[in-house]
Image (spheres, helix red, strand yellow):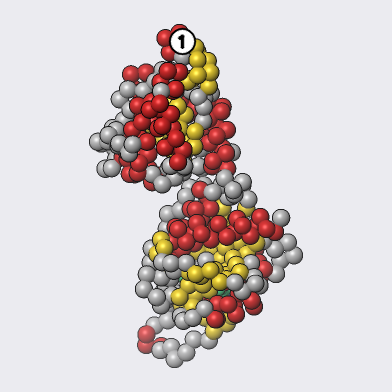
Amino acid sequence: MLRGRRVLLCVTGGVAAYKSAYLARRLVEAGAMVRVEMTESALEFVGPQTFAAITGEAPFTGLFDAALVSPHTELARWADLVVVAPATAATLGRIANGISDDLVTATVLATTVPVLLAPAMHTEMWEHPATVRNLETLREFGYHLVGPEEGPLAGGDIGLGRVAEPEEIMAAVAGILGGEGQGRRILITAGGTREPVDPVRFLGNRSSGKMGHAIADAAVARGYDVTLVTTADLPVHPAAKVIRVETAEEMFGAVEGIDPEIAIMAAAVADFRPADAAESKIPRADGLSSIQLASTPDILASVVGRVDRPFTVGFAAETGGLDRAREKAGTKGVDLMVYNDVTEPGSGFGTDTNRVAFIDREGEVEELPLLAKREVAERILDRVSAGVGGRG
Ligand code: PMT
């Protein structure tokens, strides 16, 4: 259910901390990669060794934890989801007010991924106007909440404030990470193909693979079942299946073996390859006055031409004006074309940003500003989500 998803479990200081050990085990059993943060007060209730044994890694316990240079930002970026369970009244209050004076609150402030809070406290604390106000603020921030429940509390009291049961927290985690993707199969191509001239030289292009890999990362985070066919040696979310290829022919072969519901073709595929690559390095003395070229397969066309065709997004790398991209969108028959002018500074090949325009089947254009490639990826997936929904 959570195969390869990265959950950061933050344990704060309440007696309910013992339940978080079981929650960690349930997350691991569901296939998630789990890392744990513990506050100083949490350490009063449960030993770090318990979590280390369950997750295979010692918990992080302080802002100056020697294992990482900057634990709060590194863990904030690592996670697909941050779960604070139990979340004490003090922790909720600090988060609501932007106070980041321990590892957990600093991580929550530093992260951009969804945050799930599982409050636990005595009924009087839960009902105090300060907590009520803090909860309102946290909801406004877009944080998810699970619980609390009625039941026995610390010290033999009974009332509202008991942390949600691990199974209930698991359901909330699945609801967030399952996301809109719901395990739908998505194929993404990335990087520039290399067409060999001889064993040393190739015809290639400037694509780094950053755009396609950003889409793969964003798609995993939205709960898609991602297959990435890529020429690039770049990191990608461990939950993505990765097929590494080099040439257009190899990319075509890999794509032929995949049956996606959605295809996003961000790769820069060579349209031509040397017709006969030499088997050994061509010596300079031999000279090479020309290279005979042969066409490569049109991978996008083969995907669009399938009987049970996926919702297909093509990319158009152009060097001036939208018109050619609009024409290409029509001839390629894609559901959505992503146009980028690769001559514009900060856009296209190798950059961390991109400025794109979407062209839909009706030829309607939506132009976006210059954005980080990850943000462009999110916008593409928003359009895919709306388009797939519209298809029924
Ligand atoms: O990788 P980065 O450095 O991050 O750069 C990103 C990018 C500029 C490569 C990317 O944003 C982009 O524009 N990718 C498509 C580049 C391209 O080859 O465009 P094209 O206009 O030549 O091809 C049109 C579409 O057909 C593309 O979806 C391409 O993947 C596909 N195609 C092209 C030729 C071919 N033989 N098979 C294909 O599937």
Expressed as whole percent of the image width and height from the top left, the position of residue 113 reads: 44, 45
Inspect the image, locate mark 1, and give the three-letter code of the amino acid beneath it.
Asp
Q: Residue at x 33, y 36 (%)?
A: 97
Say if 324 sits above or below 226 in the image.
below
Q: Nearer the viewer, residue 227 or 362?
A: 362
Instruction: Specify whether residue 275 is in view.
Output: no
Expressed as whole percent of the image width and height from the top left, the position of residue 25 reads: 50, 28
Q: Residue at x 57, y 39 (%)?
A: 175
Expressed as whole percent of the image width and height from the top left, the position of residue 142 reads: 46, 42
Q: Nearer the viewer, residue 210 or 355?
A: 355
Q: Callout 1 environment at 10 Å: few (<14), some (14 to 19), or many (20+)?
A: few
Q: In the visual, does 66 lie left or right of 147?
A: left
- SS at circle 1: loop
Quadrant holding the C terminus: bottom right
Residue identified by numbered label 1: 157
Instruction: Specify whether residue 71 is in view.
Output: yes
The picture quadrant where one finds residue 295 is: bottom right
Q: Residue at x 64, y 78 (%)?
A: 331
Residue lying at the far top of the rendered structure: 156
Q: How many marks?
A: 1
